Image: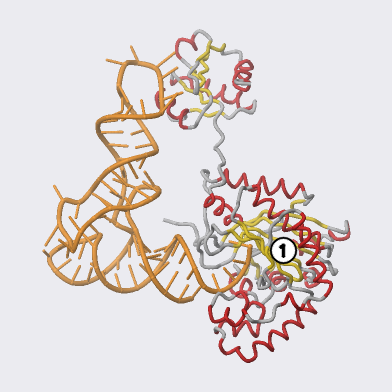
Amino acid sequence: MIKAITGTKDILPSDIRKWYHLENLVRKVFQNYNYKEIRTPVFEETALFARGIGEETDIVSKEMYTFKDRSDTSVTLKPEMTAGVVRAFIEHSLGEKQPLTKVFYISPMFRQERPQAGRLRQFHQFGAEALGSSSPLLDAEMIEMAYEILNRLGLNDLTVKINSLGTPNSREVYKNELRKYLSDTKDKLTAESQIRFEKNILRIFDSKAEQDQQIMNKAPLLIDYLDNESKNDFEIVKNYLTNLNIPFEVDPKLVRGLDYYTKTTFEIISGKVGSQSSLCGGGRYDLLVEELGGKPTHSVGFAAGMERILLACENEEVLNVPEPSLDVYLVRIDNDLFIKVSEISSALRKNDLIVDYDYLARSVKAQMREANKMNARFVLFVGGDEYKNGALILKNLSTGEQEKIKSEDINFLINRIKNYGS
RNA sequence: GUGAGUAUAGCUCAGUUGGUCAGAGCACCAGGUUGUGGCCCUGGGGGCCGUGGGUUCAAGUCCCACUACUCACCCCA
């Protein structure tokens, strides 16, 4: 038997309502903030991600689905959305058409990691990007939108963590301080952290290893080395959040794993999804557009993991999306009336009713069971003596009441079904 | 890439120290008088017990390998 690729999941009809619910909410909230949807290809030239995300990052160095296409071009399934959005932004000169570009997306992403709870190889993210402004109001707006969506889903066990990585200049100053601090104790770090010491020293803060944490607990913090501009912006973000009653924690050790972040970074954690607890993350990336060949463009954005969010909803038992019920189930009493049944169904369906019937020539009893199982509001009997006398029987399944309706009077039938109880 | 756990019907699981062990519940299908559901009753279909080796007179039941899944590390959404 051929099975789905490791780390991929089928979203079955029984689960699809949850996805609709989440996607609809996402579109609605983003539209409230006047973000327009953007859709970029699922694959791009490999170089885009290598340059955009950073060669040394784990994503680029060991997690991408990269392959040569038939014309020998190296392409990669997108592991995140920002690089693609920035590419499209530059390619279509969106920045020339208006000073600020606000876009959102909902899309599958691909990373070849070992699957576990809340982590898949094909997974889905929604997110937003605002390109063209350094205003910290937009940083805060990102957090607000993410929080709003999670909140409207009914999630409670949430923690918003924010930090500032400062401008590149202030970060360099700080990195030197950190190197000084670690110069003596470096040997006591785990092997992995010693590699990070060379490649991306800030990431040592991410380590969960006891020995690393002990050392890093006393390390100087980036937040104490911020330049005035970063410090001011960070204050504005905090004030904005406080003013809107969005609870947050400043986490000076919050370091994002993608190279392009500057200044504000944030993450929203759920306490209900196991070890992959980060539902969404993002931050400012003021240098990325220029890095990818565009004009210098201050930008900020975030991405959220949809599987993780749905997992959190399940574990908090907050997402109850009812299956839509059938308006009418047609029960065929005489088996030679298939054509008639399909004709009536067609007329009802054209009038925006949800209609189904039995295709398997089953007994009336079986058809009734089916109607009941599908939670149909009405059953319409087609056949028998009544039909010979020009009538159909409409039965209300919750009350059991039945009434005769003239076969010709389809409009009356439609009105009865649509207006019942109103 | 590393570690641990699991692998029996569509689903959730029982299967005792290896010897009627191929089962239950749910789901599915059909009946319960000739044209009407939800409850109930009766019956039925469906599994080479993840795959491949091995030990044994005998293996879902023990051993090994492989594969898949799950969780964790790692990483991140």
Most extreme residue toward the bottom is: A184
Q: Is residue A122 left or right of residue A94?
A: left
Q: Is residue A241 left or right of residue A199?
A: right
Asked if one can make out residue A420 in the rendered structure from this viewpoint, the answer is yes
Most extreme residue toward the top is: A389
The foreground one among A61 and B47 is: A61
Query: SS for tag 1?
Result: helix
| Callout 1: chain | A
Q: Is residue A176 above or below residue A148?
A: below
Hey, which quadrant is residue A134 in on the image?
bottom right
Q: Is residue A84 left or right of residue A187?
A: right
Q: Residues within 10 Å of mark 1 (few under 14, many from 20)?
A: many
* Quadrant the N terminus of chain A occupies: bottom left
Q: Residue A363's spot in the image, x, y percent?
A: 39, 24
The foreground one among B39 and A379 is: B39
Q: Is residue B4 above or below residue A323?
A: below
Hey, which quadrant is residue B33 in on the image?
top left
Disc 1: which residue: A82
Hey, which quadrant is residue A47 in on the image?
bottom right
Q: Residue A276's spot in the image, x, y percent?
A: 56, 63
Asked if one can make out residue A67 in the rendered structure from this viewpoint, the answer is no
